[in-house]
Structure formats: C-alpha cells, structure tokens
Amino acid sequence: MKKTILFTFVFAAFFAATFMTSCSNTSGPTCHSVAGSDTGAHSIYMDALHIGLLAPIRDSLHASVSGSDVTISSSALGRNITGKISASDCNAIVLDSVIFLPGDTVSIPSAIAPGGMVKIYDVRAGGSGTITATGATTKISVAKGKTNISSPIDIRNIDGMKLNLRGTFLKVN
C-alpha cells in the first residue's frame, strides 16, 4: 500500500514537473528594429490583382524611430511617411495618412504610358508595414488619386479602385 501511494506521488510530481513548467513561459515576441536602411520594390495591385503591365517601383527606405513614432524616408515616393509602432504588435507599423499636395506626383517608368511614365497624383492613402528580422513588407492603399493612363483601360481616376502598392524590402544596415 505504501509503495502504491509513493508511486502515485512520484508519478503526479513527474507529471506536474513535465507538463506544467511550460505554462510559466512568459517571453513575448521578438521585436525587430525598424531603424536603418532597406532596399527593395513596390509592386502595383488593384485590390488583390497584381498589375503585371507596370514594372515594380524600385525604392530605398530609411527609417528612424523616436519612442513609438516612426519616420520612413522613401526615395521613390520622394517624401517622408510617418507612423507609429503598434501597441499590440511590436513588429507592426501603422502609417499615418499619405496626402499629396497639389503638384506632387509619383512617376513610374512604363512602356504603356504616355511619354513612357505613369504619373500618379492627387493621392490620399493609408497603409501599414511589418518589420521582419531581414527587412520589411509594406502596403500602401490608395483611397483617392489620379493617373495619366487612358488606354488600354481608362484609369485616370483611381478613386475607389483599391489601388495598392505592396513592398518587400531587405535590410542593408
């Protein structure tokens, strides 16, 4: 009888030590640094459809961080984009609204555009980014804007067309 009680106690202690210790793991996610330079490209989509007629927009990003505030300088867009590191996910950035002032234009080389350049202007957009160990991914969703493309399809007014730029970038330093 004493051996049975002892065996039961030892078995219960072994079970508790084996299976309950993993419940006390309190480590959180690995937070990657957004600060530094990344290089890559934005691909152009209409909703979930990749627009393969337009070449990816090559870009270099430089990010700086102050507290939870992030400033990303984009050479292709010719502007700084600001945002915040998400309070619920240290690897997510919520970008502030991107609003082009009158006369601001993004030009993308393309064989289908008049003069060899797609021009996007009068833009209002928002977006997000995800920081990884090796770089970042981005998505900039355009709510309103205009282009100079009228053929083969007329997309001079892109309001509500769900145009978005999805970027993949590798950290260079």
Image (tube, rainbow, N blue to C red):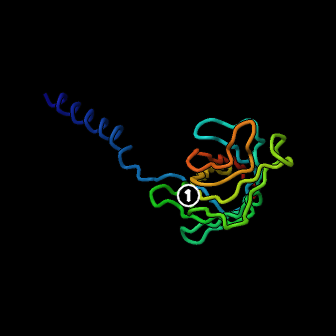
Q: Residue 83's spot in the image, x, y percent? A: 57, 64
- The answer to whether residue 55 of the structure is visible from this angle is yes
- Looking at the picture, tell me which residue is in the foreground, 147 or 37: 147
Classify residue 68 as left or right of residue 81. left
The residue lying at 62 percent from left, 48 percent from top is 158
The furthest residue to the bottom: 66
The furthest residue to the left: 1
- The answer to whether residue 132 of the structure is visible from this angle is no
47, above or below 91, in the image: above
The residue lying at 62 percent from left, 63 percent from top is 99
Q: Image quadrant for the C terminus?
A: bottom right
> For mark 1, what is the residue?
93
Amino acid type at circle 1 is Ile
- Looking at the picture, tell me which residue is in the foreground, 88 or 9: 88
88, above or below 45, in the image: below
SS of the residue at dot 1?
strand
The residue lying at 26 percent from left, 35 percent from top is 10
Q: Image quadrant for the N terminus?
A: top left
Query: Callout 1: few (<14), some (14-19), or many (20+) C-alpha neighbours within 10 Å?
Result: many
Classify residue 40 as left or right of residue 160. right
- Residue 161 falls in image quadrant: top right
Q: Residue 2's spot in the image, x, y percent? A: 15, 31
